[in-house]
Amino acid sequence: MVAEALPAPERAPGPVERWSVRPGEVGARVSGHEVSLIRPVAGEEDWERVCAALASQPVFRGPSLDGRLPVESERVFVVVGLPLVPPGWGPLAASCSCAQWRSVCGHLGAVVEELGVRADADPFVLVRWAGSDRSEFVARVGAAAARQDGREGPDAPHRPRTGGADPASAAVFWSVPDLPALPEGLAEAGARVRASAPGPLLDGLPVFDRRT
């Protein structure tokens, strides 16, 4: 994922040291040179949108709530306009303390390679780079799932509307609760996610219809 988005020359020899990832910046030291990759940080609305899209699809909701990100979820990020890895070097402010400052150098290539290795082991490295840590991300997906399920909180039970009827009556007991309306824009996001899903996943993705 990382290498495809950020093509770089052959990495410089030597270990990647002083590795760090924080919102908006990856930093490291390669062969005595300081290297950094600075990207735009996603805003609150961006995170709400991508987490709502993930929560809307059971194939992504469960793993996300468990603190995991399937490889295929990258498509969801792209569809909603928040790629985990910027598409090319243009959106990045990449710097290295070596003399080859006019172009992408081998030291930057080494950091990109290391970022790819670490992201393969834990995709939340890229989430943090984009501006959110794991716990914040999981909490946002949980809140979005709760809203979509028509609940006030992650553990709140669903209560059907009873009008003026006695809650203990047989009519209320056997009543079917109204389905919650989808959040604004979610149906469209779900359709885009389905359109971009690979064949093996498509059959597992439900279709959402807006109900008023």
Image: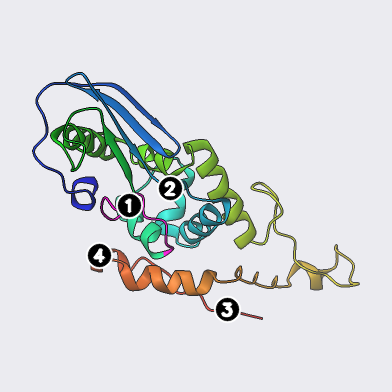
Label at residue 210:
3
- The label nearer to you, 4 versus 3, is 3
Q: Quadrant of the C terminus?
A: bottom right
Q: Are marks 1 and 4 in contact (CB under 8 Å)?
A: no
**How many other residues sit within 10 Å of disc 1, few (<14), some (14-19) or many (≥20)?**
some
**How many other residues sit within 10 Å of disc 3, few (<14), some (14-19) or many (≥20)?**
few
Apparent side of residue 172 relative to residue 89 in the rendered image (left or right): right
Q: Amino acid at mark 2?
A: Pro
Q: Which residue is mark 1?
A: 86
Q: Amino acid at mark 3?
A: Arg
Q: Are marks 3 and 1 in contact (CB under 8 Å)?
A: no
Residue 33: horizontal and vertical position, in percent? 22, 23
Instruction: Name the residue located 42 percent from the left edge and 44 percent from the top edge.
Output: 130
Residue 40: horizontal and vertical position, in percent? 43, 47
Q: Amino acid at mark 4?
A: Pro
Q: Earlier in the sequence, mark 4 or mark 2?
A: 2
Q: Which residue is mark 4?
A: 200
In the image, residue 21 sits, relative to residue 4, either above or below, namely above
| SS class, disc 4 | helix
Label at residue 40:
2
